[in-house]
Image (cartoon, rainbow, N blue to C red):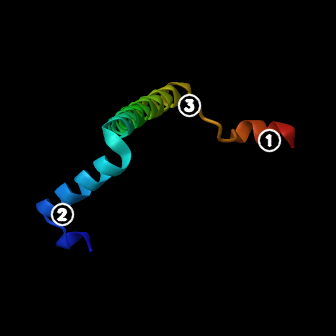
């Protein structure tokens, strides 16, 4: 459906949106969209850094928890 819309169609849609909502509301909306995208990218970056930090900590704090055969004999 959107494949049939050319550059002229997008210009007409933009003009209709500007007429209906006004320049102020459209610019405020685009500003909010920009802030949302920036926040989303920052969240992705922080999340990946947090995962990297946790995986690095897990490698340093990992220990062997397999049961020891000598301790099993002592308990029995």
Of all residues shown, which one is farthest toward the right?
A: 76
**Quadrant the C terminus occupies:** top right
- Classify residue 48 by image quadrant: top left
Question: Foreground residue, 28 or 55?
Answer: 28
- Classify residue 64 by image quadrant: top right
Element assignment for label 1: helix
Above or below, 12 relative to 74 = below
Query: Which numbered disc covers residue 9?
Result: 2
Question: Foreground residue, 38 or 59?
Answer: 38
Residue 75 on image: x %, y %: 85, 39
Query: Residue at (73%, 37%) from the top-left corner?
Result: 70
Instruction: Name the residue tied to disc 1.
Output: 73
Q: Residues within 10 Å of mark 2 (few under 14, many from 20)?
A: few
Element assignment for label 3: loop
Query: Which numbered disc covers residue 62?
Result: 3
Name the N-terminal-most of marks 3 and 1.
3
CA–CA distance between discs 3 and 2?
Answer: 60 Å
* Horizontal side of residue 73 vs 21, given as left or right: right
């Amino acid at each position: 459906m959107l494949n049939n819309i050319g550059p002229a169609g997008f210009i007409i849609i933009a003009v209709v949106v500007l007429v209906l909502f006004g320049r102020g509301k459209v610019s405020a909306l685009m500003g909010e969209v920009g802030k949302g995208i920036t926040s989303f990218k920052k969240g992705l970056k922080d999340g990946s850094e947090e995962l990297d930090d946790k995986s690095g900590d897990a490698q340093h704090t990992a220990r062997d928890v397999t049961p020891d055969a000598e301790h099993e004999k002592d308990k029995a």
